[in-house]
Image (cartoon, rainbow, N blue to C red):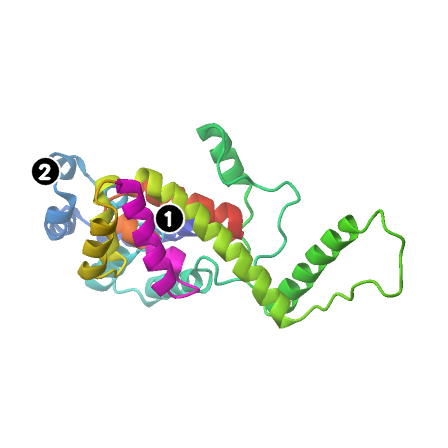
Amino acid sequence: KMFEKYTLLCQDFLSTAEPFIDSNILNQLKCNYVHEIDSKRKLSQTKDLKMFIRLLEKRDIMSYSNIQPLWYISKRYIHKPDLESKLQDYESWLEAVSPLSLCNIYQSEDRVPLIETSDSQREQRLENTAVLVPSLASESICSEYACNSMLSQLLIENSTKPFSNSSQTLYCNSEQKEQYNLDKRRKLQEAVMLQVKDRLGRSWRDVARHLGVTECEIDATQSKYPYDLKEQIYEILKIYILQSDTEQWAINLIRALEKGRRRDIKELVEELILKNSNI
């Protein structure tokens, strides 16, 4: 799984890097990130590299989608090619499994709902969500799954009708696969926009800027809905979705929320994507 792979990377990094990080180097790291961490008390409580990395995570300076601090520490203080190779492998893997860059395959028959009734249920669902790594045959597998899914629906709809040789022929081709993925992506985008709209609040302008939305578009949206904050947010998200890359819209939204210091919403979006994309 995505977060398991990130955890393993951090463990490997610590096992290699800790012997190189003495108190002097740790103080250098604290000085380097002092403005971003913005807490002298937290920095004074940080006694080793493991605590320092945890602090970076808590301050949203480092996350599964941003391992830049690990690169900095590795290149500045460690100088181990095998460690840098692991960091590079992780970033290559992360890019390969960016949300919705893969075909949606092997969905559970017990469909995971978009909104759970409690935090504990959400956590349990997330634990049970499988994360798939693409194979060389991913395209053919995806195409087969899309056809099987449509065939099952067709059989259900026609279960009470007599069988006929003139029944609708089901073609398993690239157009059907593309339409299937397009419909799923639109449903997921709508679900994400509705959740973000209800939670983002007045920080939406900062997040919009991190999404690359222009100041002109931000001002126009605010003028269009001067008294409706949620409609402002929904409109700006629609603008972003229309302008965004098909494969990268989700990961860029997650990064924008992280930069906008809305970790609560970022985690919610990650959860929705994991549940509905099997990535």
Residue 11: give its label: 1
Is 217 placed left or right of 181 in the picture? Answer: left
Whether residue 61 is visible to the viewer of this picture, yes or no, is: no
Q: Earlier in the sequence, mark 1 or mark 2?
A: 1
Residue 229 in magenta stretch: yes
Identify the residue at image location x=89%, y=56%: 163
Q: Which residues are magenta?
A: 228-253
The location of residue 120, given as percent across then percent down, is: 47, 28
Q: Determine whether 189 is above or below 181 in the image.
A: above
Label 2 Cα crowd, 10 Å radius (few <14 / some 14-19 / many 20+): few
Q: Is residue 109 above or below residue 255?
A: above
Amino acid bearing label 1: Gln
Q: Secondary structure at mark 2?
A: helix
Q: Nearer the viewer, mark 1 or mark 2?
A: 2
Mark drawn on residue 185: none
Q: Is residue 97 left or right of residue 140?
A: left
Question: Disc 2 designates what residue?
Answer: 40
x, y percent for residue 275: 51, 45
Q: Please indicate whether residue 237 sits to the left or right of residue 23 in the image.
A: right
Q: Position of residue 248 (x, y in %)?
A: 39, 62
- 236 or 108, which is in the foreground? 236
x then y, percent, for residue 81: 32, 67
Identify the residue at image location x=30%, y=55%. Answer: 66
Q: Quadrant of residue 227?
A: top left
Q: Is residue 248 above or below residue 190?
A: below
- Residue 137 among those drawn in magenta: no
The one nearer the camera, 7 or 201, is 201
